[in-house]
Amino acid sequence: MTKRISALPKRNRKDVVGEDTDVLAIKATDVEYIENRTYKGKGKGFNFDWIWGGGILILFLVFRPWEGGPLLYLFLGVSAVLIFGFLYHYIAPKRYFIANRQTGMLKLPTSEKKEAIWVAFADGFGFEKTVYASSFYTTLYFITKPEIKPGRVIELTTLETEDYWNFIVWYMDKNRPLPPGKAFDPYREQDFERRKAAGFPKPLYPSSIPTPEFTEAQQKERKRIGGW
């Protein structure tokens, strides 16, 4: 996928950004956009504790471990796997995807215990791969160019891939206004002043849609100073 904004992105309404929203995006400012990619065994609005407990109960009734023999060991083995999966979301290493708008860098979602791996957004491109696993689904990757060594591959999303790509291209173009969405509203003025101080340089990446400033007065000032 080329770095072109083809449609207005829908991401980053204010209600889907924050530590307590149980979604990936936990921070969205004029400097950084951060997603929490840490493994989670629970989902908002749905009690996964009942799934783990219910799964073990079903296994207990199916394998009848009280009868002893091989079924007892099979029950214990499968139950151990389920219990570990339940506990892992409490002990899983923290993993974050970070997009820095002002430096043009992306951070791979690696463990905090390991050295951070940063990749320049300009050094890669978007790639969609569709596979079939009970149904078709598409995954969006960020892949570094062949000449970049060592190569890096980052899985960005499996949901609304085109919308996500439009958003990330828009956000990483530091010469454009911030993407639409209430999450960015508190930072629009300071982002405007930063671009104004730089003389409103033209966008880094093309767009199929206009990207006006937040106010009409700001738009006129950009036109007067930057010429676009």
Image (cartoon, grey):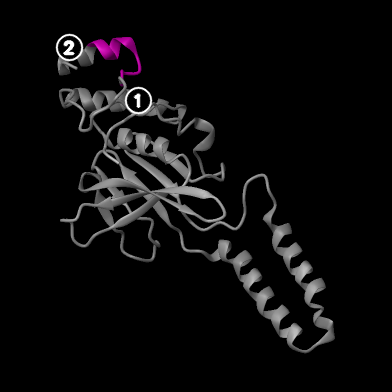
Location of residue 62 in the rendering, given as x and y in whole percent from the top left corner: 79, 73
| Lower position in the chain sequence, tag 2 or tag 1 | 1
Q: Is residue 214 magenta?
A: yes
Report the Cα–Cα distance between label 2 and label 1.
19 Å
Residue drawn at x 57%, y 66% is 88
Residue 186 vs 152, above or below: the answer is above
Q: Is residue 169 magenta?
A: no
Placement of the N terminus among the 4 image quadrants: top left
Residue closer to the observer: 99 or 138: 138
| Residue 197 in which image quadrant | top left
Identify the amino acid type marked 2: Arg
- The residue indicated by pointer 1 is 188
Q: Nearer the viewer, mark 2 or mark 1?
A: 2
- The residue indicated by pointer 2 is 224
Placement of the C terminus among the 4 image quadrants: top left
Identify the amino acid type marked 1: Arg
Q: Is residue 40 left or right of residue 9?
A: right
Q: Is residue 7 left or right of residue 65?
A: left
Residue closer to the observer: 24 or 56: 56
The local crowd at label 1, few if under 14, some if 14 to 19, many if 20 or more residues have their Cα within 10 Å, is: some
Image mark for residue 115: none
In the image, the segment drawn in magenta is 211-220
Location of residue 206 in the rendering, given as x and y in whole percent from the top left corner: 23, 29
Residue drawn at x 55%, y 50% is 135
- SS type, badge 1: helix
Location of residue 133 in the rendering, given as x and y in whole percent from the top left corner: 53, 56
Residue drawn at x 38%, y 60% is 110
Residue 91 vs 225, above or below: the answer is below
- SS type, badge 2: helix
